[in-house]
């Protein structure tokens, strides 16, 4: 007797017809096909819809179910919520239309979730393929608390599966945001109190960075949107703290999370300045430092300076503030 599917994979597509075939081929190559697939066409104006139709005609019978939806309102969050509204399985996971998964990707996730059905969030590592062919493994084998999510975003789009009920309870994807949407959602899911489990092993997702991604290459172009996302998460942290038991540990966590959030804000300021936008950079750095003591202001300015000079610094310097705990599967 065939087991009922427990996972729905949602693939959202907006154009990128020249890259879409690679992603669809990687889905077709999965060794485990007992999952539901939802493809959301988010108003594509190129040949993507035709590519989807041909692929579905050739491959639909291989999976538990394949559904193609049309969402005319542009926006990644809108498209992802459109797919979420049609999920009937216990878990849901997302994928981008320009990346690829190795053949055993969904198999290992399904095996884990069936063996540990109390899991609410499961995350894993990915590999990022550079333009010169080098594969960089993005791994964070540490406790996934809010600080880790703020700095490293281990709950990015193609790096986690989540209980469908939990995602709905959390409000789904924030349709007011158009950048850092998975980062914000990951913060919200962690603030819900759900434990994040870690699936060990070599990466089975290969990310192909592209200039036309949601974030793109220009930080300054998204400065206002970054501020919106940062302010939303700050408000969520404050609301969580207001409803907490108000112990000394709660206060320490609250202050640590706000400091981490402003470290990310300081790094963003460094990127704006690196791109030549002094006014935006100064304003953002001032906001990052405004509510902290001298010691922490100096630390935030060091993150700003390192990022301004090298384009990096946040991840390395954050280890000074946030010691990591190793975790097991």
Image (cartoon, helix red, strand yellow):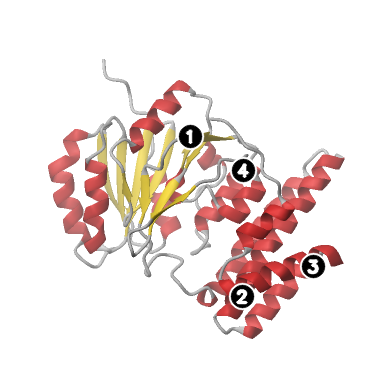
Residue under label 2: 308
Q: Quadrant of residue 45?
A: bottom left
* Any part of residue 132 in sight: yes
Q: Is residue 97 above or below residue 243?
A: below
Asked whether the residues under the numbered discs 1 and 4 touch, taking CB atoms below 8 Å apart as contact, a structural biologist would say no
Is label 2 in a helix, a strand or a loop?
Answer: helix
Distance Cα–Cα, label 3 vs label 1: 36 Å
Task: Give the label on residue 297, or none.
Answer: 3
- For label 1, the residue is 199
Q: Where residue 159 sits: x, y (%)?
A: 45, 45
327 vs 310: above or below: above
Q: Secondary structure at mark 3?
A: helix
Q: Is residue 73 left or right of residue 165?
A: left
Q: Nearer the viewer, mark 4 or mark 2?
A: 2
In this orientation, which residue lies closer to the viewer: 214 or 40?
214
Q: Disc 3 to disc 4, how far (Cα)?
A: 26 Å
Neighbour tally class for label 1: few under 14, some 14-19, many 20 plus, Cα within 10 Å? some
Residue bearing the label numbered 4: 190
The label on residue 58 is none
CA separation, marks 4 and 2? 30 Å
The answer to which of marks 3 and 1 sits earlier in the sequence is 1
């Amino acid at each position: 007797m065939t087991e009922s599917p427990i996972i729905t994979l949602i693939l959202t597509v907006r154009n990128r017809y020249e890259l879409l075939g690679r992603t669809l081929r990687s889905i077709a190559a999965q060794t485990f096909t007992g999952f539901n697939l939802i493809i959301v066409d988010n108003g594509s104006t190129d040949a993507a819809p035709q590519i989807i139709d041909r692929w579905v005609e050739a491959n639909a019978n291989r999976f538990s179910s394949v559904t193609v939806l049309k969402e005319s309102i542009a926006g990644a969050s809108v498209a992802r919520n459109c797919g979420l509204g049609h999920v009937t399985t216990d878990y849901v996971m997302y994928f981008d239309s320009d990346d690829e998964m190795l053949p055993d990707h969904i198999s290992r996730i399904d095996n884990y979730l069936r063996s540990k059905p109390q899991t609410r969030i499961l995350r894993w590592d990915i590999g990022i393929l550079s333009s010169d062919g080098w594969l960089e493994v993005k791994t964070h084998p540490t406790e996934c608390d809010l600080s880790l999510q703020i700095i490293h975003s281990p709950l990015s789009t193609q790096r986690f599966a989540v209980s469908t009920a939990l995602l709905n309870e959390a409000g789904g994807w924030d349709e007011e945001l158009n950048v850092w949407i998975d980062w914000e959602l990951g913060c919200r899911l962690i603030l819900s109190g759900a434990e994040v489990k870690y699936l060990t092993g070599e990466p089975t997702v290969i990310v192909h960075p592209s200039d036309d991604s949601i974030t793109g290459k220009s930080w300054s172009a998204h400065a206002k949107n970054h501020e919106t996302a940062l302010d939303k998460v700050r408000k969520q942290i404050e609301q969580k703290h207001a409803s907490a038991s108000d112990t000394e540990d709660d206060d320490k966590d609250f202050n640590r999370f706000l400091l981490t959030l402003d470290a990310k804000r300081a790094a963003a300021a460094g990127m704006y300045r690196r791109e030549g936008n002094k006014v935006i950079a100064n304003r953002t750095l001032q906001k990052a430092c405004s509510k902290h003591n001298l010691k922490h202001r100096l630390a935030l300015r060091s993150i700003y300076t390192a990022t301004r000079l090298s384009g990096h610094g946040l991840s390395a310097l954050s280890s000074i503030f946030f010691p990591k705990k190793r975790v097991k599967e």
